[in-house]
Each structure stands twice: as C-alpha cells, then as structure tokens.
Image (spheres, rainbow, N blue to C red):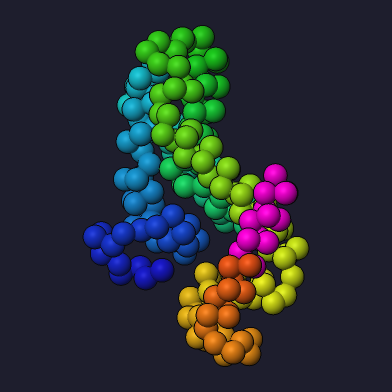
Amino acid sequence: MNKTATSNTHYTDSMIIEGMLSGDSQAFERLYANCYPSIMGMIVRNNGSEDEAKDVFQEAVCVLYDKVIAGDFSLTSQLRTYLYSVCKRLWLKQLKRSDRAIVEHNLEESEPEVALDLEVHRAKEVQFEQMKKALDRLGEPCKSILLDFYIKGLSMQDISDKFNYTNPDNAKNQKYKCLQRLKKLFFESK
C-alpha cells in the first residue's frame, strides 16, 4: 500500500491489514475511523465512559496488530465485526471485575447488525464450501464449462469453440444440463 495515499482514499479491510504490516499510519487512522464509533457507543450504553471505550479499543487493536504481525490473522469477517467482538469480550471481563452492571442494553443486542453480519458471513462460508464440494464432484467438462461461463465470463461462442461444440446453442444446452447437475449435487450435500 502506498504510504502517500491521501486521507480521501477508501481503505478496504485488506488494505488496512497491509498497512498495519507496513507501518502505514493512515491505515490505523482508517481503522479507528471505521470501527471506534460503534465500539464507543456499545461501551457507553453499557455503563462505561468514553475513556474506558478508548482503552478497550486500544487493547483490541493491540490484539489485532499482534495477530497480524505474527501471521496468525486470517480475514474471515469484516474488521469492524472482529474488533467489535474482541471489545465486547474485553468489556464484559472489565465489567465482571468491577462488579458493574450492564444498565441500558444487553451487550448481545447493542449492535445487532454486527452479529447479523457475522451470522450471514458464516452461513455464506458454509454455502461456498458446499458449492466447492459439489463442483469437485461434478467432474469434467461440466466443471470447466460452468467456471468458464460464470467465473471467467467467457461467451457461449468461446465455450463452444473451446469444447468443440457444433454451435453456441449446443454449448448453452450443455451448460444448462451441467447447472442442473450442480444444483442437484449442491442440495444433496446439505
């Protein structure tokens, strides 16, 4: 990642991780701007102060940084979701140590879109794994035809030429049959 990137640059989660690895201060600034407000809100709504929110967030960023530097971090959800989860656990520990109650909101309910995001992500991961297994079981030439059309974006004419079909309509019929077989294999694996 370019260290001279302007503050107007949109940083993706991957760019932030790369920036952390390279010591790019703007990556940390973007991480703070993207993630801190929801974490501060969660902590303040649950009997905490803004200073405590800053401390908890800083501790979570340190956990993330240590994992990134050690090569132990795999981006399987949004960074915001990951940090929110780490901060929630840290805040719950701190509340238990100090015998303070969670007053306004249940922590599980304080940011439902983050929990929902993680739940949707996990469900999609399961579906992708099922689809990969179904594709592996599909065999050739079906697997290649579907990958060429849906992933590589080849036209039916290109697929017809590649697999020596007499015309694009025959290739289209074969693609349809392959897709039906893939659907069957996918739903059998559930």
Q: Does 179 lie within the magenta span?
A: yes
Residue at screen point 67% across, 49% down: 187
Residue at screen point 61% across, 49% down: 127
Residue at screen point 38% across, 41% down: 35
Which quadrant of the structure image shows residue 166?
bottom right
Main secondary structure of the magenta stretch: helix
Which quadrant of the structure image shows residue 176?
bottom right
Q: x, y percentage for residue 90? A: 52, 28
Looking at the image, is 38 positioned above or below residue 27? above
Residue at screen point 52% across, 83% down: 168
Q: Is residue 20 visible in the rendered structure shown here?
A: no
Q: Is residue 174 visible in the rendered structure shown here?
A: yes
Is 77 situated left or right of 189 in this image?
left
Q: x, y percentage for residue 70? A: 62, 55
Q: x, y percentage for residue 162? A: 60, 88
User: Magenta residues, as a range?
Assistant: 178-190
